[in-house]
Image: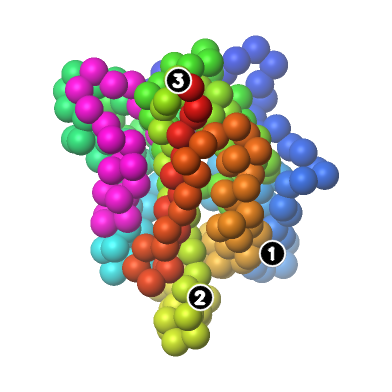
Amino acid sequence: MRGRPVAARPEGTTGHRVDRGTAATVRLVAERGQEEIRPDDPGSIRRMFRELAPDYDRLNSVLTFGLVHRWRRALVRTLGAGPGGRYVDVCAGTGMSTRAVRRAAGEEAVVVGVDFTPEMLERSDGLRVLGDALRLPFPDGTFDGAISSFALRDIADPVASLGEMARVLRPGGRLGILEIGRPRSALPRAGFDVWFRGAVPRVAGAFGHRRSHDFLVRSVRYLPPPEELCRELERLGLVEVGWRPLTLGAASLFVARRGT
């Protein structure tokens, strides 16, 4: 049964908190006079996803040749989800990863999707919360697992977002992050760059979403290298931190656990 999104905003929260000293600012003006899409301007990110919402899942499948579904399954396996567990999908969007967790964990599990764009969340189902990745509206130690997919580059302060995910994990709870990668070997990297930097915006343009995917291509440059992201997770007090490339490095999967 489809439920209605639950609006939840902690007192004092007005959207993404902007730390201008550490946030990566990605500026894109596709045409003169159009709005810039920037992670430190959450309104521009929200409007981008509002426009993308009707085509988001189909575009992801087309642009990754369907591999995104395999990547999401790999992400969900990191949780070891099981009956009776509690799990949260941060920046859940249309709920693709949320549904995958629910299938893995079974009907007895509690699986919550959180996103700050209503138009995306309305296309999900199950338990949904309209909320801020930088101030998750849950008490400390609520969940057995937390995941996020392809979201860090869209957040003003990605490290703070990771800190929030760590905060809501119970001791021993697992964290999984899925992000766009870039192959390190020369030949796969060359093919990836031709497709990702050249073809992806053009294909997205055929769906009417060229500007958002121009932003996507540029925003990836502001993701930290995998080793640096792992160090950030360790600085947050997480243990058993690691990462691995998926599909020759086209995507990266990060895993960690909250210590006991």
Residue at horizontal 19%, vertical 35%? Answer: 103
Of the residues shown, which amino acid type is indicated by label 3? Arg
Please give the residue where the numbered disc 2 appears in the rendered image.
184
Bin the neighbour count of mark 1 within 10 Å (Cα to Cα): few under 14, some 14-19, many 20 and up. few
- First in residue order: circle 1 vs circle 3: 1
- First in residue order: circle 1 vs circle 2: 1
The residue range painted magenta reads 69-91
Element marked by disc 2: loop
Bin the neighbour count of mark 3 within 10 Å (Cα to Cα): few under 14, some 14-19, many 20 and up. some
Asked if the magenta segment contains residue 63, the reply would be: no
Residue 249's spot in the image, x, y percent? 43, 68
Element marked by disc 1: loop
Residue at horizontal 32%, vertical 55%? Answer: 71
Q: Which mark is residue 213?
A: none
Q: Which mark is residue 170?
A: 3
From this viewpoint, is residue 215 visible? Answer: no
Indicate the quadrant where residue 99 lies.
Answer: top left
Label 2 to label 3: alpha-carbon separation: 35 Å
From this viewpoint, is residue 242 visible? Answer: yes
Evaluate if marks 1 and 2 touch, with contact meaning CB atoms under 8 Å apart: no
Element marked by disc 3: strand
Residue at horizontal 60%, vertical 60%? Answer: 225
Residue 57's spot in the image, x, y percent? 32, 52
Of the residues shown, which amino acid type is indicated by label 1? Val
Please identify, in this view, whether the residue under mark 1 or under mark 3 is nearer the observer: 3
Please give the residue where the numbered disc 1 appears in the rendered image.
29
